[in-house]
Image (cartoon, grey):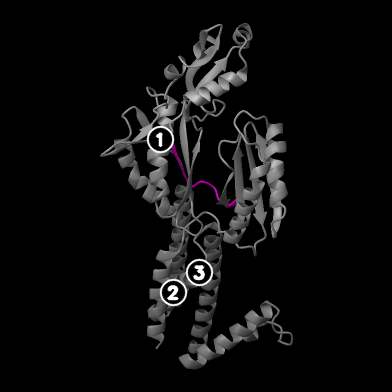
Amino acid sequence: MTVLVMAGILIFGLASYRLLPVSSLPNVDFPTIQVSAQLPGASPETMAAAVATPLEKQFSTIPGIDQMTSLSGQGVSTVTIQFSLDRDIDAAAQDVNSAIAAATKQLPPTMSTPPSFRKVNPADAPIFFLTLTSETLPLSTVNEYAETILAQRISTISGVAQVQVQGQQKYAVRVQVDPNALAARGVGINEVEQAVASANVNLPTGTLYGKDRMFAIQATGQLYDAAAFRPIIVTYRNGAPIRLSELGRVIDSVENDKLAAWFKDQRGIILAIYRQPGTNTIEVVDAVKKLLPTFRAEVPAGVSINVMYDRSNTIRESVNDVRFSLMLALALVVMVIFMFLQNIPETIIPTVALPMSIIGTFSLMYLFGYSLDNISLMALTLCVGFVVDDAIVMLENISRHIEMGKSPLQATLRCSSRCSLWAAYSVGCCTNSPSPSSSLY
């Protein structure tokens, strides 16, 4: 029965070890939701008053909120809501969605997109950074490859929570109007805005019915670069058209030219990859690395894809260091016991007991949802010392009683009871136990 029990502990322990998630810190999932709203061109004061405040008023009616903070910048506001630990994150997300819908009527009508929200974990940090740089292609083109090819493909990998594009450089056409040119021609800025919006459309215009077939009519008014915007007629003065190129500069640029990211003194695009809670960091990173050759083959030759930071390296080193410490402790224990006892059967006992104790711990860690991280590995390293001390004390004491003439069973029972009494006294569990002395041995 003992052999079967030990074999079961060994099998379940090894199977659990392969299933344990590996990360740098324990999984602490705070129910947190982050709401983002954008209003291009608005100042931070306008974003705080016209966007963040109405959202906060609606969010304050949601039950179970522990903390709510907001941050407003140029054209963007972010509201972070942290709920109590007993609040279900999915139910909280539904409440946040309903609050956003209720606050929509109070938000500025010029917002191009409604506020969006996502579940976040403030304790998480990116586990992998990729950079895309190019010396020949513009950053807007590099950004297009980063978002459409890399980010979307990486997001489908099992264990990846999200992929953030840092230093984003989305292509956009900028119209830099000259106030003097507007005043000289008597044109208002609102006329320029209306002309640009009405000229850049791609909408269905109706249906043409014939005798035998039907045609869908669609206006092809989509403009794709600055050269197509320059001839736009803004208005007429004295019967003459005033074009957009006469009122200022129309250039190819990006949506936000105040954002930038560098890699080794070169402008580029950075992809920050986050893992899902409870997943194996090393497996997620290895899955991303397997796709790198495919990515390099799909992007143009002028785009370089490099690894900026790999968080799994420190985790691998920590796990390998603990493995080496455990193996070294086992070897030292076996060597010391054999040198002092000079008995091979008695040396085999701690040789088997120590790894079995550690392997059996993995099954309990998996059962209670623990992970292999710096905290749990440190605890395992400390517990190895306890197991080693107990094994040496018990084995040495049993050997001493056997040399005094007792049978192995009597020596084992006597030592186990006395050592248990000593342990209980040491931790204060026995209130009426005798003081420890050499009589325990």
Label 2 sits on a secondary structure element that is helix
For the N terminus, the quadrant is: bottom left
Q: CA distance from mark 1 to mark 3?
A: 64 Å
Left or right of 377? Residue 60 is right
Chain part drawn in magenta:
121-133
Q: Earlier in the sequence, mark 2 or mark 3?
A: 2
Closer to viewer: mark 2 or mark 3: 3
Mark 3 sits on what residue? 365
Q: Nearer the viewer, residue 17 or 170?
A: 170
The verdict on residue 122 being magenta is: yes
Q: CA distance from mark 2 to mark 3?
A: 14 Å
Question: Which picture quadrant has residue 19?
Answer: bottom left
Mark 2 sits on what residue? 356
Which residue type does callout 3 highlight?
Answer: Met
Q: Position of residue 73 (x, y in %)?
A: 65, 34
Mark 1 sits on what residue? 206
Crowding at mark 3 (Cα within 10 Å: few <14, some 14-19, many 20+): some
Q: Are marks 1 and 3 in contact (CB under 8 Å)?
A: no
Crowding at mark 2 (Cα within 10 Å: few <14, some 14-19, many 20+): some
Q: Residue at x 50, y 12 (%)?
A: 245
Label 3 sits on a secondary structure element that is helix
Closer to viewer: mark 1 or mark 3: 1
The verdict on residue 63 being magenta is: no
Residue 224 shows in this picture: yes
Q: Is residue 370 above or below residue 39?
A: below
Q: Are marks 2 and 3 in contact (CB under 8 Å)?
A: no
Q: Position of residue 239 (x, y in %)?
A: 53, 7
Q: Position of residue 30 (x, y in %)?
A: 61, 57
Which residue type does callout 2 highlight?
Answer: Met
The circle drawn on residue 293 is none
Closer to viewer: mark 2 or mark 1: 1
Which residue type does callout 1 highlight?
Answer: Gly
